[in-house]
Amino acid sequence: MNKIIEKTDLSENVVKMVIDAPAIAGKRKAGQFIVLKIDEKGERIPLTIVDSDAERGAITIIFQIVGKTTAKLATLNSGDGINDLQGPLGQPTEIENFGTVVCVGGGVGVGVVYPIAVALREAGNRVISIIGSRTKELLILEQETKDVSDRLIVTTDDGSYGFHGFVSQALENLIQEGEKIDRVFAIGPVPMMRVVCNVTKPHGIKTIVSLNSIMVDATGMCGACRVSVGGETKFTCVDGPEFDGHDVDFDLLASRLRMYVDQEKEAFEKFRCECHGT
């Protein structure tokens, strides 16, 4: 049983938790994740480790309420326990001094790209971060990202804050301005990652994406996280979660993510009704 140390609501439907997990905190690296199970009968869900404190023996996760399990997790508070926590899992991000790197985060993906930006800065890279959300109210980790970046660009879809447009447009502007970019890390909704890859491919800028949202058991046994990368079948949980975005079959990825949409919606609605006593 792992105890929740802190809980903070970052924005509408986005929650930050600090969890007691000393064994994981002492080993995790940027890009790795945990698999969490709230109770004995709970669903296993993958969540990226946003930060860790080895001395404190704690890890930080950020998640968006999108279904039954994340909604149930959000009902827990400081002092409550989580039945099962496994990690660190997955291959860590390839970190070296590439030169100038751009870290692009969309929505809750900002929480996933943040530890990568931290590690890249520590490795001596010049880090440009582009983070975005639909509106100003939904933006997360702005100050934290600014603190680990040489330059920060903030975007909002509705223009309520920062650059009016998508993160991909801000990246394209950088390229058109003549910014020499050695590598891009893009994490967020699948359509966003796909568009970012379309922006960088003509310029030959290697672009790394994270596909952690498609995972289930995270051991490579269930096969649910199969993706096609460069024409080869890869398992996101053990081969990833990060891959060269120019090689990812985004059409196949998107179709696999839609496979259980109806069942997920039904389970979410049932949970909400139970919570409200209807």
Image: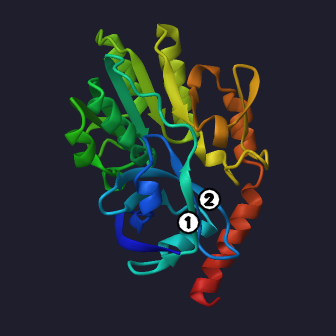
Which residue shows up at 58% across the image and 38% down it? 241
Residue 131 seen from this side: yes
Q: Residues within 10 Å of mark 2 (few under 14, many from 20)?
A: many
- On residue 45, the disc is 2
The CA span between labels 1 and 2 is 9 Å
Dividing the picture into quadrants, the one containing residue 249 is: top right
**Residue at the spot 29% in from the left edge and 23% down from the top edge:** 125
With 20 as the anchor, is 68 left or right in this view? right
Query: Toward which corner of the image does residue 133 lie, by quadrant?
Result: top left
Which type of secondary structure does the marked residue at label 1 adopt?
helix
Residue bearing the label numbered 1: 70
Mark closer to the chain start, 1 or 2 = 2
Residue 21 image position (x, y, % from top left): 44, 64
- What crowding class fits label 1: few (fewer than 14 Cα within 10 Å), some (14-19), or many (20 or more)? some
Task: Point out the image quarter for the C terminus.
Answer: bottom right
Q: Are marks 1 and 2 in contact (CB under 8 Å)?
A: yes
Q: How many marks?
A: 2
Give the percent coordinates (x, y) of residue 231: 75, 20
Classify residue 161 as left or right of residue 49: left
Question: What's the residue type where badge 1 is placed?
Answer: Thr
Above or below: residue 108 compared with residue 205: below
Residue 75 horizontal/vertical position (percent): 49, 77
Q: Would residue 170 be visible to someone looking at this image?
A: no
Q: Which mark is residue 202?
A: none
Work out whether residue 33 or residue 74 is closer to the camera in this orientation and state it: 33
Give how far across and how far down residue 203 sits, in percent.
46, 9
